[in-house]
Amino acid sequence: MLEKLKNWRGNLDGLIEQAEKVSSGFQLKDKTEISIRMVRDYIQRGILGEIDRSGRELEFNYSHLLRLVLSRVLLNDGWSLKKIGEHFEFTRIKDLEQLLPKTGNTALSAIKRLRSSVDGAKPRMSREPNEDRTYEVSRQAAKRTSIHQEMRSALRKIGLPEDGPATEEITLIAITPWFQALLQKDRIRSLTLEEADEIGKAVSASLTKLILKRGERK
Amino acid sequence: MINLEFTPEKNGIVAGAENAFEVLLRASSDQQQPDGKNKKLPLNLSVVIDRSGSMSGEPLDEAKKCAMMLVDRMSPNDQLSVVTYDSNASVVIPTTKVARKDLLKNEISRIRPGGATALYDGWSVGAEQVAQNAGGNYLSRVLLLSDGQANSGLTDEETISSHCQTMAENGVTTSTYGLSEHFNENLMTAMAHSGQGQAHYGQTADDLMDPFQEEFDLLEAILGRRMRLRIMPEVGVSFELLNGYAQDREGRFILPDLAYEADVWALMKVKINRDLCEQPTHSSIKILTATLDFLDLNGNEKRTEPCTLGIELLSQGAHSRLTVEETVKQRSIELRAAALQEQAQIEARRGDWAKVDQIMEGLETLGTDHEWIKVSIQRLKAYSKNRERESFSKEARYKSTKMRSRNVSRDEASWNMSDEKARPSYLRRKLEQGKKQL
């Protein structure tokens, strides 16, 4: 139904009316009606994006309508408003449209939404071009810290007893599955962005040196 | 048609007193399984195979054999996809009708081992393949196999399980197959539990075919799926369901799929206030009503007739002379054994073998009144005696899962090997969950 509303424009009341109509087609478990207060809250959180004004009145279009409806769908799936706001900020309208439940096949849209909720959005598929790969991988990996199993297996690999006494609080960062770093936990608290950047460069330099030493520079 | 039946621990309660007792609820059907392979629900499966480095050699060869066995057993109307994963996931066979079996098997035979274990990526790509044709009248399921820890991509157990649950709510269920010693049994059983599928494991590659056969036998025999049980207690009555079945958003309990010749069951602890029991002896009071929503063989939503449990009020003396219903007693023992094995698994993981030994003694006591428990804990005892942590943890976890939610044969009696052999594979009570047997 939303695809027929690509040229839609309207005021706040019109937005609520259209969003209610479209949402009712998705049979969401949460039957809370969309209210003016709710829309204002979403605007304040940045969920609906930039909004134009005509005099004193707000002017909405298709992109706002899509974001409002999709927010209801994602909340229904268990997303938080914070997470929705963050996701919308970096996602194109075309990709947001993919997350809407498709009539007759809720499973397909559900798996797409689930993947979107995971850091990095798409599963790493073989033979798939990966733009800006290096940055994406390290940013994802940095979010996947404190994994006890990984820590255990890393310690086991370097021959330390996994249940031995800990002398220091440390955190493990899996940069890639085969490249993991141990950090002093108290040092992380004072780490600055500049230092993180410097460390990144130092790691790149060390790895480059290893590759050059191997004589396989590309 | 599916019927519900309540069986209380005793056929009466004590008048003028608070009462607490167990009640068994069984869902079953009188329908006979039709002959002929085309009478089952069409299947829509994705086999997701771990091809990480550790699967190299016999494990991967056996996994491929299992996938090929599925191809052989599937009908031309069924749909199959095959996904592999290591550090990345790739679709080896996109969802397709199982028409040219030779071509499909050839593609499977070409799978080669790779690197790390991006388990979530593999599962989600498999789920997407199945989702393309989910709904309608397909029985849609992801069969995920792994021999390792999820160590690449999303690894958080809770998040992965919640995704399995969401997909199950949207008609795509998940079954998991753990292989050998190093997979994460907690993650794999949680995925199957949330994904409303089956949890299996094989100690060696050679043990893997057995659970695949069992799952396929079950898929061919399912007559009721998406089973949702609603229990409504009367005022003054409270209950607690003991199987650990999850609840949906409407508060209904999610029961396993029902197969021909089987009972799906729930055991509950019921408490009745004294006020409600302040009535003359030999009068009867209504305490619970249950209905079951499910999808029938044609994919139609159905609801059973409401089933009501009424019970007679008796004097203390008359009540004490009543015998305990044997079926209720057996299920109750199984659930207690399941809880003990779950606890033992946690203690074994912690390395507290003294506690494990203590729990094993409790299990042995339960076994005195339950032949299957008595014989099936022998291997578990051997693992605990030898302090084999991985083998013990896996067997304890899977046996516990099985005992909590298994389909029960309608003519089941005390355990003996020859009777078990005669049953359909999905109704057998195995001695060891991770071993091919019988």
Image (spheres, grey):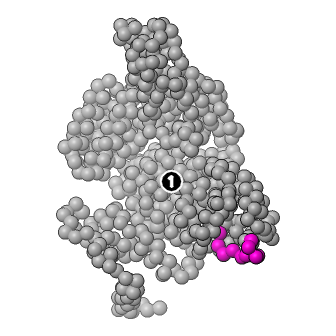
Badge 1: how crowded within 10 Å, few (<14), some, or many (20+)? some
Residue B37 visible in the snapshot: no
Name the image quarter holding residue B298.
Answer: top right
Q: Is residue B241 above or below residue B83?
A: above
Name the image quarter holding residue B301.
Answer: top right
Q: Is residue B364 left or right of residue B238?
A: left
Q: Quadrant of the N terminus of chain B?
A: top right
User: Magenta span: helix, strand or loop, mainly?
Assistant: loop
Foreground pick, A177 / B75: A177
Q: Is residue B324 left or right of residue B31?
A: left
Q: Position of residue A166 (x, y in %)?
A: 21, 66
Q: Which residues are magenta?
A: A47-57
Q: Which residue is mark 1?
A: B162
Instruction: Say which residue appears at 49% left-offset and 15% top-offset.
Output: B311
Q: Is residue B140 above or below residue B221?
A: below
Q: Confirm whether the magenta stretch covers residue B1.
A: no
Q: Position of residue B387 (x, y in %)?
A: 22, 48
Q: Is residue B381 left or right of residue B312?
A: left
Q: What SS does tag 1 mark? A: helix
Q: Is residue B29 above or below residue A150?
A: above
Q: Position of residue B230 (x, y in %)?
A: 57, 33
Q: Is residue B278 left or right of residue A3?
A: left
Foreground pick, A8 / B384: A8
Residue A213 visible in the snapshot: yes
Q: Quadrant of the C terminus of chain B?
A: top left
As shown in the figure, which amino acid type bears the numbered disc 1? Ser
Foreground pick, A198 / B364: A198
Instruction: Say which residue appears at 72% left-offset and 71% top-offset.
Output: A58
The single residue placed furthest to the front in the displayed view is A56
Instruction: Say which residue appears at 51% left-offset and 80% top-offset.
Output: A133
Instruction: Say which residue appears at 31% left-offset and 42% top-offset.
Output: B343
